[in-house]
Image: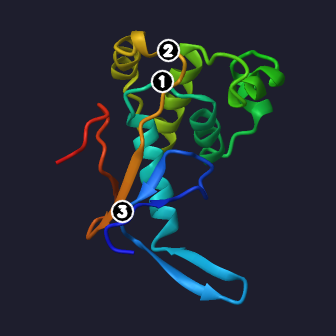
Amino acid sequence: MKGQLYHYDACELDNVFLLNGYSMRKTVDGEETVVQDAEGLLRAITDAVIDAAVPLNGKTFRFLRKRLAISQRQLAESLDLAEHTVSLWERGRLTLPRYSDITLRALAWERLRGQVPFWSLCKKLSQMDGKRGGGEVSLVMHRNEQGWASLVNGAGDVAG
């Protein structure tokens, strides 16, 4: 498996690939993927989604909401919306407004990092003007001595 990217879909995102930090194990039902430090990987994916320089799409929005253990109803109530609206955003049937993107990122940042860089999040979203519609950056994750990290930085460039 060395050198091959493994498409990691256990997080329900289409754009996450593992460079290393996993192995394949044979079972009676076939092959099974074993990920080293799966919770650390989910934390790193969450960080990469928060920092990505593209608007959240429905799947990344749902991923963050679930990582924060917030129901659609709870989120809808906090944004003074119908629960159905959150469902439509997550299924890609309704365009995700900027305020919802920034609210969920800020909430994730606060809960997971203990701080809210509200102004820098606002500036990041204003720089995304031409990128409406919820693009995606492929997240290539690798494991090193410090744990899991993304090879793509927040600007969408490969980190070096």
What residue is drawn where x is 51% and y is 80%?
Answer: 24
Q: How far apart are marks 3 and 2 (CA)?
A: 29 Å
For badge 3, the amino acid type reads: Leu
Q: Where is residue 40 in the image (x, y as percent from the top left)?
A: 45, 62
- Considering only vertical position in the picture, is 36 above or below 111? below
The residue lying at 57 percent from left, 46 percent from top is 13
Label 2: which secondary element: loop
Please tell me how crowded label 1 is: few (under 14), some (14-19), or many (20+) other residues with Cα within 10 Å: many
The residue indicated by pointer 2 is 132
Query: Which residue does the image show at 38% across and 11% down from the upper left?
Result: 126
Cα separation, mark 1 vs mark 3, equals 25 Å
Q: Which of marks 1 and 2 is nearer the N terminus?
A: 1
Disc 3 crowd rating (10 Å Cα; few below 14, some 14-19, many 20+) is some
Q: Which of 26 and 97 is in front in this view?
A: 26
Pointer 1 with pointer 2, Cβ within 8 A? yes
Q: Distance between the residues labelled 1 and 2?
A: 7 Å
Checking the image for residue 55, the label placed there is 1
Using the rendered image of the protein, determine whether residue 151 is visible from the camera's viewpoint. yes
Give SS at disc 3.
loop
Q: In terms of depth relative to the viewer, which is nearer, 100 or 6?
A: 6
